Image (spheres, rainbow, N blue to C red):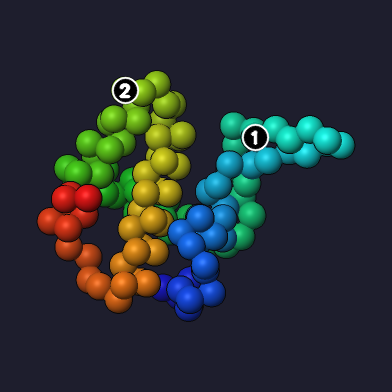
Amino acid sequence: MAEIKDIAKFENRNKLIAFAGTDPGIRESGTSLKISGRISKRGSVSLRRYVYLMAVSVIKYNNYFKDYYCKKKEEGFPHRKAIIALVNKLLRIIFALLTRKQKFNMELIAAN
């Protein structure tokens, strides 16, 4: 919350993900665009660090998020890429909760 401050400044969840710097990096050269295999790392370093720590913790203590991480690993993602996928999922959930002014409810998350 301290890093995001006001959720209204983000038009959509992708803007929040970009602010955290966990969106894919894009390399431009002339007329060519290439999406690199790395995150952009633009935006808030602190937010990126906190959400990373959240992701590591929810893998240990929450079966829903652990299953999501394991699913990404089974799809062939390396550990760090699977963690970033989980980080982006957490950011999407945070965005939805803040814009709807709701509290976290595991039953609602698991139903979607």
Whether residue 50 is visible, yes or no, is yes
Of 23 and 51, nearer the camera is 23
Label of residue 107 in the image: none
Q: How many marks?
A: 2
Whether residue 60 is visible, yes or no, is no
Q: Position of residue 34 (x, y in %)?
A: 70, 32
Amino acid type for the residue under numbered disc 2:
Glu
Amino acid type for the residue under numbered disc 1:
Ile
Nearer the observer, disc 1 or disc 2?
Answer: 1
Name which quarter of the figure residue 38 lies in: top right
Which quarter of the figure is the N terminus placed in? Answer: bottom left
Q: CA distance from mark 1 to mark 2?
A: 23 Å
Above or below residue 29? Residue 108 is: below
Above or below residue 1? Residue 44 is: above
- According to the picture, the residue beneath numbered tag 1 turns out to be 35
Of 29 and 84, nearer the camera is 29
State the SS at label 2: helix
Q: Position of residue 82 (x, y in %)?
A: 40, 35
Mark 1 neighbour density, 10 Å: few (under 14) some (14–19) many (20 or more): few
Q: Residue at x 16, y 50 (%)?
A: 111
Q: Earlier in the sequence, mark 1 or mark 2?
A: 1
State the SS at label 1: strand
Mark 2 neighbour density, 10 Å: few (under 14) some (14–19) many (20 or more): few
Label of residue 74 in the image: 2
Q: Residue at x 17, y 49 (%)?
A: 110
Q: Position of residue 8 (x, y in %)?
A: 48, 76
